[in-house]
Amino acid sequence: MQTSYGHLTYCTNIHAGENWQDHFSQLKEHIPKVKRNLKQEGPFGIGLRLSNLASLELSKEKNLQVFQDWLNAENAYVFTMNGFPYGGFHDTVVKDKVHEPDWSTSERVAYTIRLFRILAALLPAGMEGGISTSPLSYKLWHTRCHESIAMTMESCTLNILLVVEHLAKLRRSGGPLLHLDIEPEPGGLIENSKEYTDWYFQYLLAAGIPFLQDKMGIDEAAAIDTIKTHIQLCYDVCHFAISYEDPILVLNRMSSYGLKTGKIQVSAALKSIMSKEEDQRKAQIESFKKFDEPTYLHQVIARKSNGQLLHYPDMPQALEDGMNPEVSEWRAHFHVPVFLQEYGALASTQDEIIKVLQRQKQKPFSKHLEVETYTWDVLPEKLQVNIDQAIARELSWVQQHLEH
């Protein structure tokens, strides 16, 4: 939906379905209900997630036309897409497979360009569109060898530049402005703002300037502008909070470098100041243990009393080290509902969301906002509602903080 500070939606990765028929059925069931719960009469924006299989099926002209007709009938539109999970995201163990295939592969390139073709066909006239994507690769696949990381960075960057070329030529031919939004994540090859800006200048611009000069016959300044237009940041609030990065400092750094934010993913992580009392600390660990489910990665970054950070690739490793006396705080990757700050013995990073939304009100830095919550059963029983009401509640909470 359109707000005074950008288009607001939720990510449809919450709905099951890996082929297009199943996913479309979920959209037809839930989108009208979410709209009714919001009492929202204007056009309703959708944050579309398509697996590789679904993207192949939706690329067929007949399917695309049926979907467009449905969007028109429902007064809905697609302005952003989640291109991070390529394969199965439901009813399967995902874990680090969410990064497969990574950006070093031709499969990731083909999938992403296909998504952009779909988005270009669906995007309302005059509107810009964006697709969020993985942070190049999974860092733990490469950490044994620094040389391996550098080579992976290079190969991933060259493949991303193929997407830049595609988007720039589309724009030059009169098509819409589209951008690929890189999503840093704990455990990813790009985890935080420093790694993002280092990659952007040391790899992306370094390789991209001569690449575009050769491919498109443009000068250096135009090449830089083209890259900064089509490669932007996906600011996932949960991910940056886990890394203990202050939103205002990150956004000021981005601004100083002239880098853009294509999408704000409104999401909350779990956190807890770890007690020095043994019994209380055990209770906190038991609370975190409830989130140790086997499907997705739940990275934990702990802060020590001296300010240093400890990175645990998944919840089990953190739990094993739970009684570490040097650790004073935990933050865990688990997208809990954004409207609530307290979860029993644990809390959420809701305050980080509020900072980001306040900055968006004061000095808008993105045109796209997407709520990404997929953990509903952690709520107290009295606050649990059906999924359509839950999604509407999240969107209403964000809208209230933007408009008031």
Image (cartoon, grey):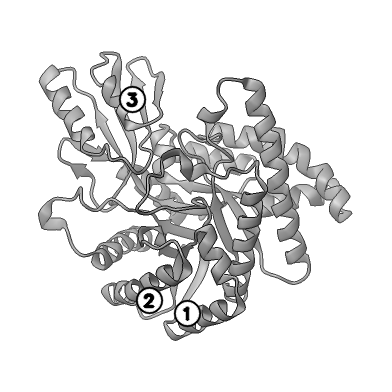
Give amino acid for label 3. Answer: Gln
Q: CA distance from mark 3 to mark 2?
A: 40 Å
Give amino acid for label 2. Answer: Lys
Closer to us: 357 or 267: 267
- Above or below, 315 relative to 146: below
Q: CA distance from mark 3 to mark 1?
A: 45 Å
* 8 left or right, relative to 344: right
- Above or below, 79 relative to 140: below
Determine which of the numbered discs, if any, sits on residue 247 in the image. Answer: none
| Foreground disc of the pair 3, 1 | 3
Name the residue tied to disc 3. Answer: 317
Q: Earlier in the sequence, mark 3 or mark 2?
A: 2
Q: Determine the residue positioned at 71% across, 70% down.
A: 175
- Above or below, 322 relative to 244: above
Q: Determine the residue positioned at 43% across, 36% down.
A: 246
Structural crowding at the residue carrying mark 1, measured as other residues with C-alpha within 10 Å and reported as few (<14), some (14–19) or many (≥20) = some
Q: Position of residue 114 (x, y in %)?
A: 63, 62
Q: Is residue 370 visible?
A: yes
Name the residue tied to disc 1. Answer: 71
Using the rendered view, name the quadrant where residue 255 is placed: top right
Q: Earlier in the sequence, mark 3 or mark 1?
A: 1
Structural crowding at the residue carrying mark 3, measured as other residues with C-alpha within 10 Å and reported as few (<14), some (14–19) or many (≥20) = few
Secondary structure found at label 3: helix
Secondary structure found at label 2: helix
- Tell me, yes or no, whether the two marked residues, 3 and 1, touch with CB atoms within 8 Å: no
Q: Determine the residue positioned at 84% across, 43% down.
A: 210
Tally the marks. Answer: 3
Q: Determine the residue positioned at 60% across, 68% down.
A: 118
Name the residue tied to disc 2. Answer: 28
* 320 left or right, relative to 20: left
